[in-house]
């Protein structure tokens, strides 16, 4: 299994990231030793996916401390550089969470911060494996078929996490149980995380799948070609409203109409109890060029302006299940302003 985020001690220590911008054409790695390089990697999506961003945030504090030591930063400069990492992308709560998990240990020294960050990485994999078992159990009990057909959106596998995956982890678990027929992987415009990354992971894991355009997904659901939609999350608010890659809410609306379950899977670190509802979530707006330019070629008229929200929010009343390592809640059946307390970290 590929490691998206890894601390390397050998030679001059660094944070090693697989460069997801280049996949699947090239498997190359970035060795990160400065805050500026890390912020660029985050903002250009060399590293991406909420849990992977959480691990990157925690290990990023180690990068900042080491750079600060080499360059003689004072305390204020160190804090400002760590804040740059924390704020590099706004929607996934995990990035700030990962930074916040380790910053209280800064006075104890870089070795202690690295120990905590390494533990956070290990905990994420354990959470993913546990939530995958919960999710597969819930889906098979709800659908009542021996084999299920799944639609998913964006990338939620090992590349988006520290290992194994979230929504992808449930798909993998279903496959390992012999309970998966096929996956419809949405290509995920405009940066193609589904076509480039999810299909790459599914291929490596030998999981049968097709890649479909995002525009096909609602019809795939309404035509009865799938039994369940499983997606990841970047932030889940206290009432169950869920931010995820733009296009997710279209799947939820179609599932609601078709009467099939829409399932959200995430580690409890993605649950943000300090945010009451999805209306408070900051949605990242990315450059319009990502929509207007395809593979280096401009596809829209020169005068056209792009609109490029990177995420959307699915209201809790059309979310059938939210799965974390702590269990499953059913927002559409049991709405409550504090529903997520039951499965938060
Ligand atoms: O912009 P990205 O690629 O970071 O968006 C990623 C997603 O929306 C994922 O679905 C989400 O982070 C969950 S990853 C397990």
Image (cartoon, rainbow, N blue to C red):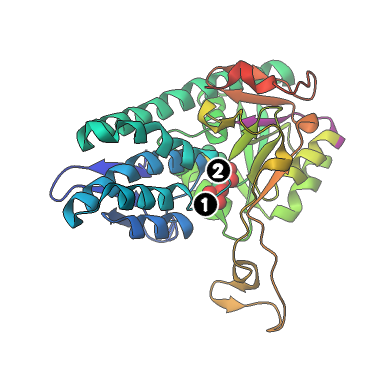
Q: Going by the image, does 81 lie left or right of 251?
A: left
Q: Is residue 283 left or right of residue 62?
A: right
Residue 229 vs 307, above or below: the answer is above
Q: The N terminus lies in which quarter of the figure? A: top left
Residue position for label 1:
89
Q: Quadrant of ligand 1?
A: top right
In front here: 324 or 297? 324
Name the residue that disc number 2 marks: 92
Q: Which residues are magenta?
A: 257-265
Q: Is mark 1 within 8 Å of ligand 1?
A: yes
Residue 251 vs residue 222: left or right? Answer: left
**Residue 28 picture quarter:** bottom left
Query: Few, some or many C-alpha atoms within 10 Å of disc 2 (few <14, some 14-19, many ≥20)?
Result: many
Location of residue 169 in the rendering, given as x and y in whole percent from the top left corner: 51, 31
Task: Report, in whole angstroms, how far the alpha carbon at label 1 lies from the one at label 2.
Answer: 7 Å
**Is the residue under label 2 in contact with that under label 1 (CB below 8 Å)?**
yes
**Badge 2 residue CB within 8 Å of ligand 1:** yes
Q: Identify the secondary structure beneath mark 2.
A: loop
Residue at the image position 53 percent from the left and 23 percent from the top: 131
- The answer to whether residue 39 is magenta is no
Image quadrant assignment for residue 336: top right
């Amino acid at each position: 299994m590929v490691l998206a985020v890894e601390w390397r001690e050998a030679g001059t220590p660094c944070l090693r990231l697989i460069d997801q911008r280049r996949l699947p054409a090239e498997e190359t790695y970035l060795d990160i030793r400065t805050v500026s390089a890390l912020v660029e990697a985050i903002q250009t999506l060399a590293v991406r996916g909420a849990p992977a961003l959480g691990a990157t945030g925690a290990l990023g504090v180690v990068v900042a401390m080491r750079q600060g030591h080499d360059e003689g930063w004072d305390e204020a400069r160190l804090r400002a550089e760590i804040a740059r990492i924390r704020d590099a992308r706004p929607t996934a709560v995990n990035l700030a969470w990962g930074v916040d998990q380790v910053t209280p240990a800064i006075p104890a020294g870089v070795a202690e911060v690295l120990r905590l960050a390494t533990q956070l990485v290990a905990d994420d994999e354990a959470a993913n494996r546990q939530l995958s078992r919960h999710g597969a159990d819930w889906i098979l009990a709800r659908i009542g078929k021996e084999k299920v057909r799944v639609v998913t959106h964006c990338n939620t596998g090992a590349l988006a996490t520290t290992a194994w995956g979230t929504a992808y982890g449930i798909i993998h678990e279903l496959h390992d149980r012999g309970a998966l027929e096929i996956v419809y992987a949405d290509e995920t415009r405009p940066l193609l995380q589904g076509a480039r990354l999810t299909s790459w992971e599914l291929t490596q894991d030998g999981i049968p799948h097709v890649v479909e355009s995002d525009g096909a997904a609602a019809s795939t659901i309404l035509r009865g070609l799938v039994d369940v939609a499983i997606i990841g999350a970047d932030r889940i608010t206290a009432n169950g409203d869920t931010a995820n890659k733009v296009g997710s809410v279209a799947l939820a609306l179609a599932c609601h109409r078709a009467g099939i379950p829409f399932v959200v899977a995430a580690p409890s670190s993605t649950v943000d109890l300090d945010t009451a509802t999805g209306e408070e979530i900051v949605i990242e707006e990315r450059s319009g060029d990502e929509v207007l330019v395809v593979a280096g070629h401009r596809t829209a008229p020169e005068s056209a302006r792009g609109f490029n929200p990177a995420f959307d929010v699915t209201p809790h009343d059309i979310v059938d299940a939210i799965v974390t390592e702590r269990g499953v809640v059913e927002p559409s059946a049991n709405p409550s302003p504090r529903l997520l307390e039951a499965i938060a970290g």
